[in-house]
Image (cartoon, rainbow, N blue to C red):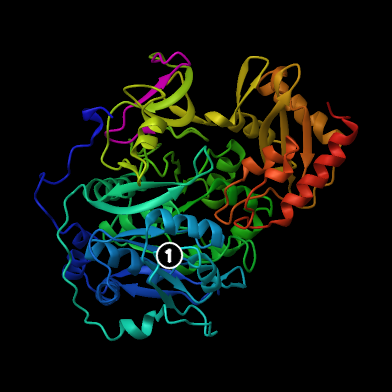
Amino acid sequence: MRQDWIPLNCGENGVKNKWKVNCLDRHVQTCPERVALIWERDEPGTEVKITYRQLLELTCRLGNLLKRQGVRRGDCVTIYMPPCPLAVASMLACARIGAAHNVVFAGFSSEALADRIRDAQSSTVITVNQGVRGGKVVDLKRTVDQAVQNCPSVQQVLVAMRTENTVAMTDRDVPLEEEMMKEDVVCEPVAMDSEDVLFLLYTSGSTGKPKGLVHTQAGYLLYTSLTHRYVFNYHDGDVFGCVADIGWITGHSYIVYGPLCNGGTTVLFESTPVYPNPGRYWEMVERLGINQFYGAPTAIRLLLKYGDEWVQNYNRSSLKTLGSVGEPINTEAWEWYHRVVGDGRCPVVDTWWQTETGGICIAPRPSDPEAEIVPGMAMRPFYGIKPALLDTEGEVLSSNDSTGALCISQAWPGMARTIHNHHQRFTETYFHPYPGFFFTGDGAHRSKEGYYQIVGRLDDVINVSGHRLGTAELEDVVNQCPGVAESAAIGYSHDIKGEGVYVFVVLKKAVMVEEDVLAQQLREMVSRSIAKYACPDFIQVVRCLPKTRSGKIMRRVLRKVVERNTDELGDLSTLDDPDSVHEVISGHRRLCGDGKQQ
């Protein structure tokens, strides 16, 4: 890696600081009774509010308990918990005593959890007896028990109680709340260098082996606090509602570290967008007085399918800013989000960033309050972010109205520093493809006005007869069909064209249409909006798309189905609805058996 790609330290090199006081201690000194966390439990109307004073006490007790259990500076603690105050306290307690945390999404299987525990070399795991989501109870402790059987490094498992149901406990297991209450409410924070590790977070890699990205102390905290304040126009007293899971980078940056650094009030959402009904988000907005709402396009498209009434039943006048995260948002979903959810008065910030970037890199705000926002575009680089578009030869595309590989040309505070135990993989993945640039893996278009639009992962680009077709662009057209709720486009091997286009479509509720009629209608729309070469070869109507519990469409699974490699589907345990895969498989066989759509 080039020396100039090592970000400047945010604290003087060699001088240790207690960075963690920025999230708790300094706010306790000025506003101890301000609400830090609102735990929106799965059961509607049973929210729990935790003040900064209470959160500091929880964190200190837990930090002292971890030290009593032998956790030391430089260790890595794995956290396998749903969104809850003790999960946040666990993260902050690790940081307070100088240990890194490795939060694993509580929907992962025991095998996936074990992989991450082993790679992080954790001796301590923190979990709960059971999780509750969408009215269903999930035995998380049982998953941990299965995982640690294959993790010889694990010496103790701290178990919190989310439900009143007892679970089997072994000599290795520690009752978390009971032991915490034996600890003092004071735990002096350990002084750390600005570049010491704050946490690991595993994200999927092209090789199939998850990579543990490393984020460090000062730069990450600085970047998340700034982006939280300026992208969302956050002010003291606002209630920030990010409905992601803490197991993902969005939860780390915009539920925990960014809002708490700013002394904010942040919501921990434990449930689903449709439990107990499709009005759950908006009922919560009214009840909690949420001012900024940050969610995934896939959830917006899901709720769009249920119509406007579920939104309009609730008072959303508290909302000031709406945000989307995780994937490009299509125009129809953006406009519905803006018009119906925000009553046409709330700016929608379509944010682009990654686990690797630590925080938001491109978004419509901050900008002049009257500056235009173009639907479905991330638009403007954040302070200090220098995007560049490069062609297939590695040449910089300097003019506007260009499309290429999205790279970043200089370091920024929030960027990941390495992959845990695999620095060579880090440099090969992000710096070798385009020497002198950080390669994001995404493609982007820069408009005539100089605004950036993400066109999807470069491995989500379909090459049809030599024409590069972004799946996000294609899906945006398909989703404009009045009967379509959402879609997923993928490429598949084609003997003549190189790659063909296969589109999966979910219809809105109560829409009845013949598949052949829909296919013809969609092909005409694609032909008009993009080009004839972009027309899908196959259009398959499905009840729902296979997604993770965080709402991410599992395009890898769809590709395997279309390529008829169903014996290589891999671990499906993290899917929100595993049965959706079997329905996709049977529908694909039916559709492609006669080949009538080609």
Residue 212 image position (x, y, % from top left) = 40, 48
Q: Is residue 26 left or right of residue 394?
A: left
Q: Is residue 148 visible?
A: yes
- Toward the viewer: 264 or 470? 470
Which residue corresponds to the image point at 63% horizontal and 69% vertical from the top-left?
Answer: 276
Dot 1 corresponds to which residue? 152
Answer whether residue 392 is magenta in the image.
Answer: yes
Image vertical order of residue 157 relative to residue 591, above or below: below
Image vertical order of residue 495 relative to residue 551, above or below: above
Picture quadrant where residue 394 is located: top left
Residue 42 image position (x, y, % from top left) = 54, 71
Prevailing SS of the magenta stretch:
loop
Image vertical order of residue 182 relative to residue 85, above or below: below
Q: Is residue 208 left or right of residue 389?
A: right
User: Callout 1: helix, strand or loop?
Assistant: loop
Q: Is residue 106 left or right of residue 230?
A: right
| Magenta residues (range) | 380-396
Residue 127 image position (x, y, % from top left) = 45, 71
Residue 590 image position (x, y, % from top left) = 87, 41
- Toward the viewer: 317 or 80? 80
Picture quadrant where residue 520 is located: top right
